[in-house]
Amino acid sequence: RLSETFEATYLGHPEGTSGFLRPLGATRGQRLDLLVDWREGHGAIHGDKVQAEITGTTYDGRPKAKVVRVISRNPDPIPAHLQKQEWGWRAIPLEPRLSQIVSVPPTDLAGDGDLVSVLLDPDPGAQQIKGVVKARLGRPTDLRIENKLTAALYNLRTEVPDAVMEEMAPFPTSIPEAWIQGREDLRELLTITVDPPTAKDFDDAISLEVLPASEDGGWLLGVHIADVSHYVAEGGPLDKEALLRGTSVYFPDQCIPMLPERLSGELCSLREGVDRLTMTAWISLDGDLQVRETRLAESVIRSRKRLTYDEVKEGCIDNAQARRRDMGRDVAEMLDEALRVSRSLTAKRLGRGALNLDTDETEFVFGEDGRPVDARRYAHHDAHRMIEEFMLLANEAVATFFTRRKIATIYRVHDVPDPLKLEAFKEVAAAFGLLRPYDPATPEVLNAMLDKIRGGPLEAMLNTLLVRSLKKAEYSADNIGHSGLALQDYLHFTSPIRRYPDLAVHRELRKVLQKKPLPDGLHSILAVVAKQCSDTEQGATEAERENDKWKTCLLMRTRIGQRFEGRIQGFSLKAAFVRLDSPFVEVGVPLGALGGAFTVDENRTKASTAGSGVVLTIGDAVKVEITGVDEDLRRVSAWVVEAKAKDGKGKAVTFVPSLAAPAHLREADFVREPAPPRGRPPKSVRQAADPGRNAMDDADRSWARCLTSAADHLGVSMWPVHFANNVELRVFAADDLVSRV
């Protein structure tokens, strides 16, 4: 509401000209970042806690706000470059949205050029941003330094407290016989695990039995999940640390586990040939794959075989006899049946209206020295979908168990999509001839469209756009259903080693099965836990994406000047994004490096120029040359050598840009949402910029940040114009009086 104050976190913008406010306490489904004009930022910097109020809406209807006062600085340490200057020491933050330079006192913890963790002065009213070095993270050339920096950037917990180690110390390495009493003994049952080749935390196993005709046929599916709740006492140090982490974080070459390695990789992991405590969901399916009966039980298993997805594909999809012999006849035959059942489950799920979003992943390959040497396209296949279908079935079964008994729990919910966003997606799909204007945006129509583009050049882009059109799934104590899966009852039960909500569900389930009382106010308690887990999940997802970008930089820094083929995956207002065929990574091409004045359409599907009549569209094949890598900003720059484009009449043409010296990307070029226009200089000044305006060296960038910080204190806006290796900063006051610095 207008003039109503609220507390929020201030989020900076890479251009330094604006910011956004994220209201505190909002769930992921409710989250709406509010635009803040630079004149109304009240001195806030990225990460500050502020008091703000709504001031109106932007030209396109988005709400905007202003900062009333800065309550406090970000209390979390930030990673930065430590630099020694003649006048003292300073730290250059690695967060692109935090462009201010931090003054720090001399320290014995680190030296010039080191990467450090800096704690900002909590006083938001100080005339200069100050901080203190808390720890040395390493040197820029250290092996896996990017993992440390990502953890520091997203405040991931990596150290295990002493109290947690003390709690784990008495745990026996093998299961005592007393722990098995009262559990279903399934150690002789044929159970297997299927996971990625690098996995250590095996938290789910499956079994499948074909039921005889005398029992009306069908199948008995067993989903056996590691019983982590047996080890993690509620409210203890281990439990508190797991809740703070919320989830395991997976980098391509490292895992930051939610639970310590002794639990996640040893005592709880369902390793081959080892007895392990489990929680089992028995699901009886009839011949039409309808659930006849569900039974939940505490159990103990001994996994017969540890397999990878690709091994299952090789033996049971590609029918490689050597692999089948290695599996064993009984395992191979069970997997044959499991694949048949899972394919039918997939068809049934899509038939009820679930979306079939299936995206390719990037798999980094590392050399003997531990550094990335390649990035491959890793596509999901039926072995992945088999496990996914069985886990979905188990999660639904447990959710239904709680719902029917009216017992509070943590659900995995997914609200219905925003109709306006779906209409915007339909416009994009219609532009490619995939949907008609009058086609309804129903799951059936969308799935048919996705099937058309599967494996084609538009698949990745349209999958991504569709996901962005949907609301984000989150954890909640209130069951509003899961629209993406077309289920009313759904939760996460199958990964308690790596997700806290699953652990919480297991803990409740054991109490119910053991007929123990549940605490008063359970719904309110779980609502707080659900909110925290949604937030930690979001942070982990962002950290994983950022680390992938860092790995891409490390991979491509030795490939500057080399040429690669790829396809355009998307546009921002200032850049095109190209997914290379091999290595399977994304690079950015500044539109200014294409020659001519290219403009991007409002749907961000194509860029065109009136001069040459060339139209570049998402999915177009291009050949690019790598021109630069900026590890601080996690960006790889390229320019287009040749593109398969169209002219203004839709005729196919080969486009060869005329620009000989391509520009390098700035951090703001990668912002796929339009940058707010506030603080924008006059058009005549913008047009005076040299084509090489982005070619800043480190000294230029540091000097520009110094001047930007000074201008912030003076209450003016600056627009940088870069010429070769020097920087001209034109300063604009509110009355448009121009002066030079």
Image: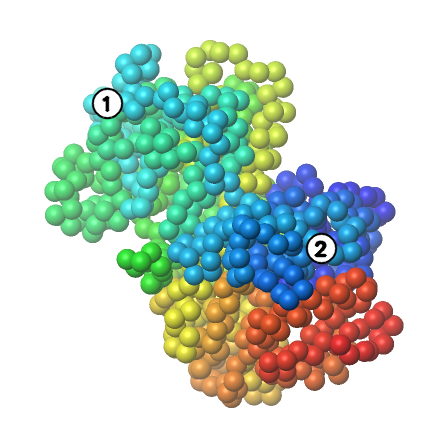
* Residue nearer the viewer, 267 or 417: 267
Q: Is residue 186 left or right of residue 70?
A: left
Q: Is 96 drawn above or below residue 162 in the view shown?
A: below
On the picture, is 97 further left or further right than 338? Answer: right
Can you tell which mark lies on residue 187?
A: 1
Placement of the N terminus among the 4 image quadrants: top right
Name the secondary structure under disc 1: loop
Which residue is tagged 2? 129
x and y, in percent, of residue 292 in the image: 37, 25
Which quadrant of the figure has residue 510? top left
Specify the amino acid type for callout 2: Ile
- What residue lies at 52% left-to-right and 77% top-to-bottom? 616
Q: Do the numbered discs 1 and 2 sit on residues whose CB atoms are within 8 Å?
A: no
Q: Which one is in front in this view, the residue at disc 1 or the one at disc 2?
A: 2
Q: Is residue 144 above or below residue 599?
A: above
Is any atom of residue 4 visible in this view? yes
Q: Where the C terminus falls, by quadrant?
A: bottom right
The image shows residue 40 at horizontal and vertical percentages of 81, 57
Q: Nearer the viewer, residue 614 or 572?
A: 572
Q: Residue at x 47, y 29 (%)?
A: 162
The residue carrying pointer 2 sits among few (fewer than 14), some (14 to 19) or many (20 or more) residues within 10 Å by Cα, namely some
- How packed mark 1 is, by other alpha carbons closer than 10 Å (few <14, some 14-19, many 20 or more), is some
Cα gap from disc 1 to disc 2, whole angstroms: 62 Å
Q: Which secondary structure lies at badge 2?
A: loop
Mark before the other along the chain sequence, 1 or 2: 2
Question: Is residue 333 toward the left or the right of residue 390 in the image?
Answer: left
Point 36% across, 60% down: residue: 372
Q: Position of residue 276 (x, y in %)?
A: 30, 25
State the image coordinates of residue 198 (x, y, percent, origin top left).
31, 46
